[in-house]
């Protein structure tokens, strides 16, 4: 039994490390250290306009410097309908399309 004790200890240590990986990932995500996290992206509202179509308002950025995107969402595509900055004005690129 003495020969199997180190192997059992190593197995338990390995399982403990495996169980700690999800907690470590959640901890890193909470501190914005994992790439690809968009914590400044929030869905403000969503309205169903058909069986599979929605109009969604998304807020990007911080509270002081944010942009609202009005998106048309369907199973095949996502279309930006309007982009509104923090002052309430349409972005110049979108203003020309909206006229």
Image (spheres, rainbow, N blue to C red):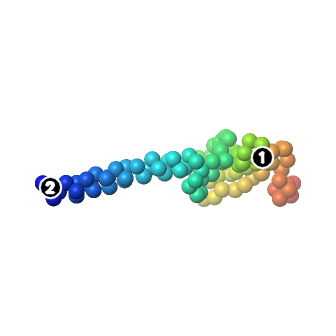
Does the rendering let one see residue 17? yes
Q: Report the residue marked by disc 2.
A: 2
Quadrant containing the C terminus is bottom right
Q: Residue 27: horizontal and vertical position, in percent?
A: 51, 47
Q: Residues within 10 Å of mark 2 (few under 14, many from 20)?
A: few
Q: Nearer the viewer, residue 12 or 77?
A: 12
Outermost residue, front side: 2
Q: Residue drawn at (65%, 44%), measured in percent from left and top? A: 43
Q: Residue drawn at (15%, 59%), measured in percent from left and top? A: 3
Q: Residue 52: horizontal and vertical position, in percent?
A: 59, 49
Q: Nearer the viewer, residue 48 or 69?
A: 69
Kindly report the distance in space between the C-alpha atoms of the residues bearing marks 2 and 1: 65 Å
Does the rendering let one see residue 53? no
Q: Report the residue marked by disc 1.
A: 65
Q: Residue drawn at (58%, 48%), measured in percent from left and top? A: 31
Element under disc 1: loop
Q: Nearer the viewer, residue 1 or 20?
A: 1
Q: Residue 76: horizontal and vertical position, in percent?
A: 60, 59
């Amino acid at each position: 039994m003495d020969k199997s004790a180190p192997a059992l200890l190593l197995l338990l240590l390995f399982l403990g490390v495996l169980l700690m990986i999800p907690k470590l990932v959640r901890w890193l995500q909470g501190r914005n250290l994992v790439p690809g996290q968009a914590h400044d992206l929030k869905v403000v509202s969503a309205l169903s306009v058909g069986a599979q179509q929605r109009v969604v308002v998304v807020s990007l950025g911080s509270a002081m410097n944010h942009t609202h995107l009005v998106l048309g969402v369907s199973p095949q595509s996502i279309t930006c309908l309007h982009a509104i900055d923090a002052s309430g004005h349409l972005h110049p690129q979108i203003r020309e399309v909206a006229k």
